């Protein structure tokens, strides 16, 4: 049997499906046929409005102009996450997890520099100017800065539905993706148990050599067809529900937040994402610790503080249920799960689209030529993404474990039997030394050690300071001074998010 890879079939649309089809078509469309099957009977969730800086590179690889993306997807600039009331329940704390790594991070112990040189400042503010830029509501660049370039590192906030529509148009008109709008009714395997073809409601038989499952939580190919189980993580991270709502600004000049706002509440947390035309807001919680009605009351109270009770009562809330879990295997035979079909834990730190990008990058760069090669890549892919999912779970759990908030929900998160053993060991280690590359040795860590430092020291975790040599103390003082100067330059020279987005769109001719 000829097992050469000639035709890749993506099952499912949405952001995951179209990003997959787009990148594979852009990088392999001359050699391979790329098709995407999208059921007209199934609506995508349309959530996942936050991206990491990696999205800039992904959009460039696909061939989408930044201004077209910003205009079409109601997108804004995201420079990190702001965590509000996570340290305690007194309603008076916040810290940032910015996207920038601080200058000198690889060469000197910045925790000790901070402790000795600038203990009156927050950790992130002392060693990095981005948290101050975010707090001031400023953009990550100026009008003259080239597309996809930056002064401070950034990703995006976006309208997920509009993003999928932009990708659909771009992939079908410019990249030659074969778009099949039909409902799958059966799946046929060959004698080696690889998927050979898919039968559709209209009577089509679609043959393929490599199938990418982007069918969402149902996992049509990886789960329903092959029976690859989900590994529940609810014993570690308890959230399984969300209420989502779209909120209009008070007026057209209302400021756009430069970071995702994540506000801790009694039984979960609330996200607040600023787009140019609206805010995307929602409450993530555990059904074990509160009812949907109680969750609605919590979110209503939060929204009432910014838009008033009357406007809040007129809003339409959407309930989303999910099982925090990931697949036992992500690549099986000639099927690869990408996006929510591979798993979903919760939206904290917005790793969903980043995992899509990492998945399709590895598929594209390691594209197998036949089944013999595919079997080896399957093994490597599964090992790599098993590692990544475990690190995501640990990093998200960290936020809950070191909080000083009280109550059944928060107390349960801090119970030792709910904390992964590796994280427990690291927390013990970090009492004596700061997180470093030795704790997270992969070349492409999904959360590098500096991210752990931002969260730990933003939430008041104590690490024994290391006594720096006189030479390093001098270097540290220079780094603190340089950061202070850079911060002033950014605060003086960067426009607001809304000003930059409005100027970019006004000054660029509309092509789409």
Image: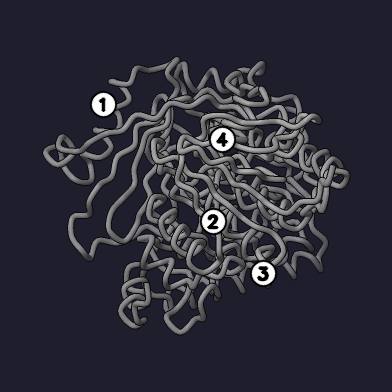
Give the mark, 1 or 2, whose residue is nearer the N terminus: 2
Verify CB contact (< 8 Å) between mark 1 and mark 4.
Answer: no
Left or right: residue 224 versus residue 273 is right
Label 4 secondary element: strand
Residue position for label 4: 199
Residue at 22%, 54% (x, y): give it. Answer: 249
Quarter of image, res 90: top left
Verify CB contact (< 8 Å) between mark 1 and mark 2.
Answer: no
Q: Nearer the viewer, mark 1 or mark 4?
A: 4
Q: Residues within 10 Å of mark 3 (few under 14, many from 20)?
A: many
Residue position for label 2: 178
Residue closest to the far left: 310
Label 3 secondary element: helix
> Could you say where residue 349 lies in the image, as x and y percent from the top left?
53, 44
> Could you say where residue 379 lies in the image, as x and y percent from the top left?
83, 38
Q: Which mark is residue 479?
A: 3
Q: Is residue 241 above or below residue 501?
A: above
Residue position for label 1: 297
Q: Nearer the viewer, residue 506 or 447?
A: 506
Q: Quadrant of the C terminus?
A: bottom left
Q: Nearer the viewer, mark 1 or mark 2?
A: 2
Residue at 34%, 29% (x, y): give it. Answer: 319
CA gap between label 1 and label 4 equals 46 Å
Q: Nearer the viewer, residue 160 or 88?
A: 160
Give the mark, 2 or 3, whose residue is nearer the N terminus: 2
CA gap between label 4 and label 2 equals 16 Å
């Amino acid at each position: 049997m000829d097992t050469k890879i000639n035709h890749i079939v993506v099952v499912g649309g949405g952001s995951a499906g179209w990003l997959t089809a787009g990148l594979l078509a852009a990088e392999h469309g001359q050699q391979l046929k790329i098709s995407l099957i999208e059921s007209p009977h199934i609506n995508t969730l349309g959530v996942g409005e936050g991206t990491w800086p990696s999205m800039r590179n992904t959009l460039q690889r696909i061939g989408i102009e930044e201004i077209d993306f910003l205009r079409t997807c109601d997108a804004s600039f995201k420079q990190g996450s702001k965590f509000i009331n996570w340290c305690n329940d007194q309603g008076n704390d916040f810290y940032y997890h910015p996207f920038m790594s601080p200058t000198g991070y690889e060469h000197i112990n910045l925790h000790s520099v901070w402790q000795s040189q600038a203990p009156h400042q927050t950790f992130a503010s002392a060693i990095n100017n981005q948290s101050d830029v975010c707090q001031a509501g400023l953009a990550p660049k100026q009008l003259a800065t080239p597309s996809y370039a930056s002064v401070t590192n950034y990703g995006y906030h976006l309208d997920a539905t509009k993003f999928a529509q932009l990708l659909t148009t771009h992939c079908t008109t410019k990249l030659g993706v074969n778009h099949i709008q039909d409902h799958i009714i059966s799946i046929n395997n060959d004698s080696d148990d690889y998927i050979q073809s898919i039968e559709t409601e209209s009577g089509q038989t679609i043959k393929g050599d490599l199938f990418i499952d982007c069918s969402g939580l149902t996992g049509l190919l990886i789960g329903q067809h092959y029976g690859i189980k989900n590994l529940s993580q609810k014993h570690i991270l308890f959230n399984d529900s969300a209420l989502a709502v779209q909120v209009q600004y008070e007026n057209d000049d209302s400021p756009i937040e430069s970071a995702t706002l994540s506000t801790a509440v009694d039984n979960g947390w609330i996200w607040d994402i600023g787009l140019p035309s609206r805010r995307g807001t929602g409450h993530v919680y555990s059904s074990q610790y509160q009812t949907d009605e109680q969750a609605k009351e919590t979110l209503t109270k939060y929204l009432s503080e910014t838009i008033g009770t009357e406007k809040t009562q007129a809003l339409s809330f959407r309930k989303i249920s999910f099982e925090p879990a990931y697949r036992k295997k992500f690549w099986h035979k000639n099927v690869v799960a990408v996006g929510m079909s591979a798993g979903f834990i919760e939206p904290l730190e917005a790793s969903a689209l980043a995992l899509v990008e990492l998945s399709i990058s590895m598929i594209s760069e390691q594209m197998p030529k036949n089944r013999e090669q595919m079997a080896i890549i399957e093994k490597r892919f599964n090992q790599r993404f098993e590692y990544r999912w475990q690190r995501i779970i640990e990093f998200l759990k960290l936020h809950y474990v070191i909080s000083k908030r009280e109550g059944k929900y928060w107390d349960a998160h801090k119970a030792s039997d709910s904390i992964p053993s590796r994280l427990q060991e690291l927390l013990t280690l970090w009492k004596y030394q700061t997180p470093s590359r030795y704790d997270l040795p992969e070349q492409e860590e999904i959360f590098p050690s500096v991210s752990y430092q931002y969260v730990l020291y933003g939430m008041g975790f104590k690490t024994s300071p290391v006594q720096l040599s006189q030479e390093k103390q001098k270097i540290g003082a220079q780094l603190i001074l340089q950061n202070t100067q850079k911060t002033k330059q950014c605060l003086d020279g960067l426009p607001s998010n809304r000003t930059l987005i409005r100027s970019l769109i006004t000054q660029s001719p509309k092509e789409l």
